[in-house]
Image (tube, helix red, strand yellow):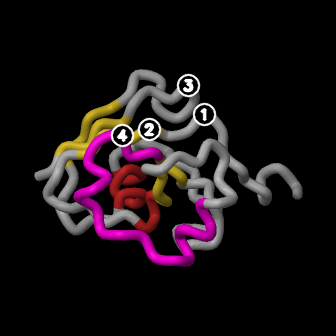
Amino acid sequence: MPKITVLPHFEICPEGAEVELEAGSNLCKALLEKGIKIEHACEMSKACTTCHVVVRKGFNGLEEMDDIEADLLDRAWGLEPDSRLSCQVIIENDDLIIEIPKYTLNHAKENH
């Protein structure tokens, strides 16, 4: 099983985490099942950017993102070349290191 390393995040995962996840799993859903409470305001329907992560290792081993995900990511806080929406990432056989950005744009939570 691939090992997913989540780098420390001051609110969501202060100590960081290492979890083994099944290949073929949805990254966001699998992290939630492991107790890592990543935001997902649109309930993983590819309509927001709250589950944005930066893939520090293993990005090239992931399936390519589609145009909708790429367009949504243009609105994400802290966008980097290796950014993905975790709700759209299907875990492959490679280990990943991911970073959850310090901030997220959650318009529902922030009353926008």
Tell me, for residue 10, which label it has, or none.
3
Q: Residues within 10 Å of mark 3 (few under 14, many from 20)?
A: few
- The verdict on residue 72 being magenta is yes
Q: Amino acid at mark 1?
A: Lys
- Which residue position is annotated with label 1? 102
Which of the pair 12/48 is nearer the observer? 48
Dots 1, 2 in contact, CB < 8 A: no
Residue at x 66%, y 46% (from the top left corner) = 77
Name the front one of labels 3 and 4: 4
Name the front one of labels 3 and 2: 2
Residue at x 62%, y 42% (from the top left corner) = 78
Name the front one of labels 1 and 3: 1
- The CA span between labels 2 and 4 is 7 Å
- Furthest toward the right, the residue is 112
Q: Secondary structure at mark 3?
A: loop
* 19, above or below 26, in the image: above
Dots 2, 4 in contact, CB < 8 A: yes
Q: Residues within 10 Å of mark 4 (few under 14, many from 20)?
A: some
- The verdict on residue 10 being magenta is no
Q: Residues within 10 Å of mark 1 (few under 14, many from 20)?
A: few
Q: Amino acid at mark 4?
A: Arg
